[in-house]
Image (spheres, rainbow, N blue to C red):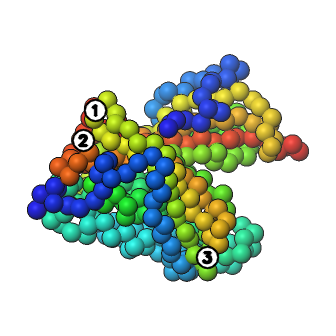
Amino acid sequence: MSARDPQASRNATDLPDEAQRMIDTPLYEEPGEFPIEMGYVYNTCAAVQNGNPIFWDPAVAEAVTGGPIAPPTMMSVWFRPHYWAPGATGERKALQTHFDLKQILDLPEAVVASNEAVFGEPVRPGDRLTTRQIVRSIGPLKQTKLGIGRFWTIDVETTNQHGEWVGTEIYTMLGYRRPEQ
Amino acid sequence: MSATEVCGITAADIAEGQEMPALRHPVSVTTIVLGALASRDWRPMHHDKDFAVERNGVKNIFINTPNNAAWFERYITDWTGPKGRLGRLRFEMKKSVFPGDEMCFSGVVRKLAADAAGCHWADLELTISVDGEVRTTGRARVAIPTDPADNPWTRKGDRWLP
């Protein structure tokens, strides 16, 4: 299975320096807002009626995963900001490098072309996770159904408090300009 | 209890081309709101029908992306048992799932192979349909125990190559 969308696998040769410098440079390293806790694990399992005993039976969790863990697909859950927090203003953007690229490349519209998650070390209650964003590629300008634009790929890498790799979400985006823009 | 005593499929039990058992689940407003809030997705189109209709131009609130991932994980590990360990998941939500829909999950083993570290992987092709119409398609890569004594969750570092 290919990790990346072939549309975004080759870098363009006409990129502004600011965009070129972003490629393969880790950006926006951020800790999660709270330690991992089982309440959300139970909420998630209940919401999809996931009866996997590694989440519900401590003896099975101990035998199979060396203690309780969170479902791997919850990786992005731990980084969504609180709906409200004291003193918080404005909307926090979850994938800031994407919005940076839209601005630098002057492509005001964007859609997610594909996303894929790869899972590493299990996430355990009490873990403190950190993410960082890495632009992996920015493709050449091309005509698409939506307008003229470029595909780009951003990895969001997550690690735990021991520095172990927990997982990566790979987003391929199409940034574009509508024909009238 | 030891991991060997925990039931589930092994690589010897499956073959390329094998279909996974279907899973059907009726979707209610509660299904969608529970999933959105459990995934900390507070955006109104997943709990506020007026917003979904007026701003998104759809008929009702709809299942959000991270909850769709959680549904796929449940579907996969219902089949593998607790020792199945998800390595990769990719999916595209082509059309939304709304209250009143009955989701039908199906899947096929497209490839079964051991990697250089001896881990057995099943590559799955997944679909969520409603009344025969495909709403979401996906691909997953899940590690399956080689035999009842094997446990993919013990793999780390160079021995875990998702």
Quick one: label 3 or label 1, which is nearer the N terminus? 3
Check if mark 3 and mark 1 are on a common chain: yes
| Residue drawn at 32 percent across, 47 percent down | B11
Mark 2 is surrounded, within 10 Å at the Cα level, by few (under 14), some (14 to 19) or many (20 or more) other residues, namely some
Q: Say what amino acid the circle numbered 3 marks.
A: Asp
Quick one: label 3 or label 2, which is nearer the N terminus? 3
| Residue drawn at 63 percent across, 24 percent down | A11
Tell me the SS state at disc 1.
Answer: loop
Comparing A16 with B18, the one in front is B18
Percent across and percent down for residue A42 are 33, 70
Q: Where the C terminus of chain A falls, by quadrant? A: top right
Q: Which mark is residue B3?
A: none
Circle 3 residue: B101
Q: Say what amino acid the circle numbered 1 marks.
A: Ala
Tell me the SS state at disc 3.
Answer: loop
Q: Which mark is residue B117?
A: 1
- The mark closer to the camera, 2 or 1, is 1
Which quarter of the picture shows residue B132?
Answer: bottom right
Comparing A150 with B158, the one in front is B158
Give the side of residue A91 with respect to residue A107, left or right: left
Check if mark 2 and mark 1 are on a common chain: yes
Whole-number angstrom distance, CA of label 3 to CA of label 2 = 39 Å
Percent across and percent down for residue A99 are 62, 43
Whole-number angstrom distance, CA of label 3 to CA of label 1 = 42 Å
Check if mark 3 and mark 2 are on a common chain: yes
Tell me the SS state at disc 2.
Answer: loop
